[in-house]
Amino acid sequence: MIIFASACDANYAAMNLALHHSLLAHATDDQWVHWWVTLDDETAALANAARERLVAHGHRDVLRVVPGDAVLTATPGLRHALNNRTGGAYYWTWASQVTAFVAGSAAPSDWVVYLDSDNWCLGDPMPSLREVPDDADVAMLTHRFPPHRASMKNRAHWWVGFNAFRATPRGQAAAAWWAAMVRARCALHDDGDAYLDIPSGLAGDQPPLHALHRIAKVHEIQRPGFVASWNADDSTLDLGAAWLFQAHEFKFSRDGTVVKRTGYPMPPAFLERVAAPYEAAVLAAAKELHA
């Protein structure tokens, strides 16, 4: 079983539902579910209503709505850590906590794949997991900064938005350590990324990923086709092979209207084939949520 897991509040609910629709459209393996961890009561109500509508319209019942309180209750120290975080830092704290929570209850043969809510599948994500060697416990993507942004690699090699943990003892331990490290640095207001030449305040949950190879066997996903705002203008990018889009800096109102696009350059082909369809998908999801 492959368990995709994401978390968001009402501000990202339409984006998360668009993500779920993209999984329904592209994920070819039928042995998967999508856990949606809801960070407020409004999102829980919207997500449950969306699940009921999807089932009523004949879609597979693969959406699992999990209240954020379940993660808070099961994770010692998480409330204290979150009390020390606001804004973006509050939300990035959840990625590792949700991953460890789901991995802790999974079977050893399961994969737990954390997905940022502002991800969107343009193709089947499953081949990215099938390339992982049988003896690997963790699989991750790098940021894949283009050559003209090579200096940005200092901010972190690994990207958090598509992290896969096999629920082996080593995989569970790696997820648990990542979550514990993030909680500890939140509680202590720790910026300590100087050893990676990362400026203070950036990439707060990413640096601990550099240590996971000490706990488990880590595989770097090689499959081409990961598209993000920061590499949209990479001249070598093949949009025909694109399978995952990370909508970094894109923001939407509750009704699905675009209020901000990325500040990175967006070539015409990217606008036409990625950004515009994504914005339409979020708009449709918002209308569905607030019908």
Image (cartoon, rainbow, N blue to C red):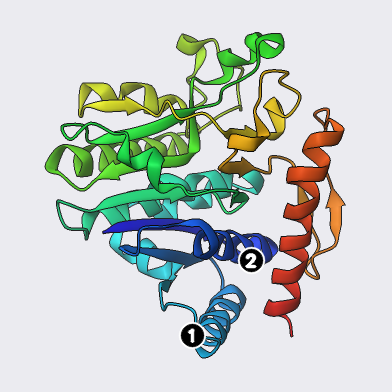
Name the residue type under label 2: Ala
* Mark 1 Cα-neighbour bin, 10 Å: few <14, some 14–19, many ≥20: few
Q: Secondary structure at mark 1?
A: helix
| Residue 236 image offset from top left, x and y in percent | 67, 18
At 63% across and 10% down in the image, what residue appears? 150
**Tag 2 residue:** 13
Q: Nearer the viewer, residue 67 or 256?
A: 256
In which quadrant of the rendered image does the C terminus lie? bottom right
Which of pointers 2 and 1 lies earlier in the amino acid sequence? 2
Q: Depth check: 225 or 6 in front?
A: 225
The spot of residue 136 in percent (x, y) is 21, 32
Is residue 9 left or right of 70 when viewed as pictured? right
Residue 55 is marked as 1
- Image: 172 above or below 14: above
Task: Give the percent coordinates (x, y) of residue 213.
Answer: 26, 22
Q: Would residue 164 appear left or right of 270 to someone viewing this image?
A: left
Q: Helix or strand or loop: what does disc 2 sit on?
A: helix
Position of residue 172 relative to residue 15, above or below, is: above
Q: Given the image, on which type of amino acid does mark 1 rest?
A: Val
- Say which residue appears at 16% left-offset and 57% top-offset: 107
Between residue 181 and residue 36, name the one nearer to us: 36
Residue at the image position 22 percent from the left and 53 percent from the top: 110
Query: Residue placed at 62% from the left, 77% from the top?
Result: 42
